[in-house]
Image (tube, rainbow, N blue to C red):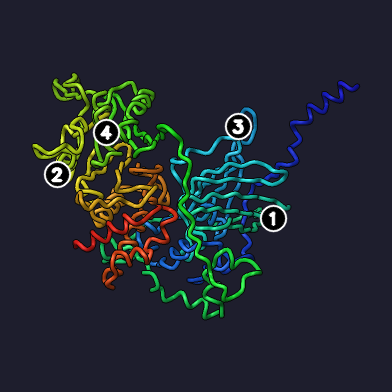
Amino acid sequence: MRQLLVLALLVLLPAVPLAAQIDLTGTWTPRYHEDYQDRIPGPDLGDYLGLPINDAARLTALSWSASRLTMPEHQCRVHISPYIYRGPLTFRSWEEKDPLTQQVVAIKNYISTYEQMRTIWMDGRPHPPANALHTWMGFSTGKWEGDMLTVTTTHLKEGWVRKNGVAESDQATMVEHFIRHGDYLTHVSIVTDPVYLTEPLIRTDDFALEKNYEGSWLFPCESVVEVANRPKGEVPAYLPGENKFIAEFTSRYGISEKAAMGGAETMYPEYRLGTGLKENVPQPKQDAKPSGIQVMPVQGTIFMLTGPGANVTVQVGRQGILLVDTMLAPLAPEILETLEKLSTGRIRYILNTSGFAEHTGGNEILRKAGVTVVDVGAPGALNIVDLAVGAALIAHGNVLKRMSAPTGVQLPVSSGNWPTDTFFEDEKSLYFNDEAVTMLHQPAANTDGDVMVFFRRSDVISTGDIFSTESYPVIDISRGGSVQGIIDGLNRIVTLAVPAHEEEGGTLIVPGHGRLCDRSDVVLYRDMVTIVRDRIQNMIHKGLTLEQIKAARPTLDYDPRYGSPDAFIEGIWKSLRRT
């Protein structure tokens, strides 16, 4: 009898769901009674009440102009997952299960606003490496804690904390709790941002289950030219102290300006009007980078190698290997070991985006490991033979000028690192591994020899130092660089790149340093450089010296993200003084 009872229980167990795992499937619509003004009509300009923001976030918000949303590259920019649940939306939730085990692999959310699809992985997979692509929804993993679903999200793009210009950086992470009470759902989000927040930001939203929802699930967006004859290169923004709309909120409600400016200390009962705000700009986040060379698949035939030096872009195929840049010389042997795992082919081409050592240091070692090839047969015959020891090494002619020296002068760079082939035109193209590869010269950017490389079939742009996710751009005045050249280069990337759905994906971008990106990341970086240029230009017109400009901190809102600004400010100042 005891054996029969045990057998019966074993038969029944698979049919009994785990009590802790609550069913979240269905269509959920929000209840806006909490924070209605913030979530539907929109907050007033200058209303940063209740936000633990720092001075950098405050300046970002005070500089923000809604006119920026009229720019085509901003019109279809969507809300990130920490914000999108607070706006007008309906979301549908369902489970995806393994067909063999019926274990839940992922919980999916389809969000009607901007047609966003979010995946919460439930199978224990790890989060991607730090240099992986960031997205609007980020990368989310979930686990059940009792009857509460807890979700951790990383790899978020830059977005909004409040849609009046208060930003959330791409370094932010989020922990969420989904708690169901019958036909109601409570959503708790806890956002930590080392760039713009001094404390975690905790918010709650409520949803109700809709059993017969008949609303729209579509939210298509197509960018258009809303403002005709906009000056080329303009990025709408308020100069520091010139946003005249900020006072409307405080005067309408009789709120102290210091309190309206937010900050963690204003969120607690101990705060009193007139106590002032402490300056609280955190130091830039110093992520522990993995040692050695890391491989990141991009798309098509393209990979990105990251390490202690600059990024290396790798194209592999039936004809061999093409490299864009070579990092520092000590890393070359490890790069060769990594390439052996990606392809059995030889290095045929090395393309340099500039003459800086972190891009060219491994030239000699990696070039000697490859071979130069020519087709000696009829067109299409592919009778490839080795022409010489060493891969072809191509760069703009100005790079060779900087690396070499007149007769009798000590060479600044070993001749083994010099390009074997140069060009002085705007473009140089080659066809390799069944793909058109175009080198695009960007005059007077970081230097006078910068190029970006466009892999047309794979739809990938390797930018060199024109774009970085880790620091302000380098403006080497002594080598012919200028801030306008960098802005022109960033705008050129924005024009070349074609985003996929709602400004995400599509053309992918390998920066000179930092993580894999798409066009929207370049747009925000372009905005930053342009806004800072405009601020410094305004200070020069007012007669401020370089020391006074640095003291005025024109990069305050971006310093927690990009680090020390002194060289950047000085480079802009020298550029503008020359024009």
At 18% across and 34% down in the image, what residue appears?
419
Q: Secondary structure at mark 1?
A: strand
Give residue 421's position: percent from left, percent from top.
16, 34
At 19% across and 20% down in the image, what residue appears?
384
Amino acid under disc 3: Asp
> Whole-Å distance between the Cαs marked 2 and 1?
64 Å
> Whole-Å distance between the Cαs marked 1 and 3?
28 Å
Residue 300 lies, with reference to residue 548, above or below; the image says above
Earlier-in-chain disc, 2 versus 3:
3
Give residue 301's position: percent from left, percent from top.
34, 32
Residue 1 lies, with reference to residue 498, above or below; the image says above
Disc 1 crowd, CA 10 A, few/some/many (<14, 14-19, 20+): some
Q: Which mark is residue 184?
A: 1
Earlier-in-chain disc, 3 versus 4:
3
Q: Nearer the viewer, mark 3 or mark 4?
A: 4
Q: Nearer the viewer, mark 2 or mark 3?
A: 2
Q: Nearer the viewer, mark 2 or mark 1?
A: 2
Q: Quick one: which residue is furthest to the left in this view? A: 407
392 with respect to 555 (left or right): left
Q: Which mark is residue 98?
A: 3
Q: Which mark is residue 425?
A: 2
> Whole-Å distance between the Cαs marked 1 and 4?
54 Å
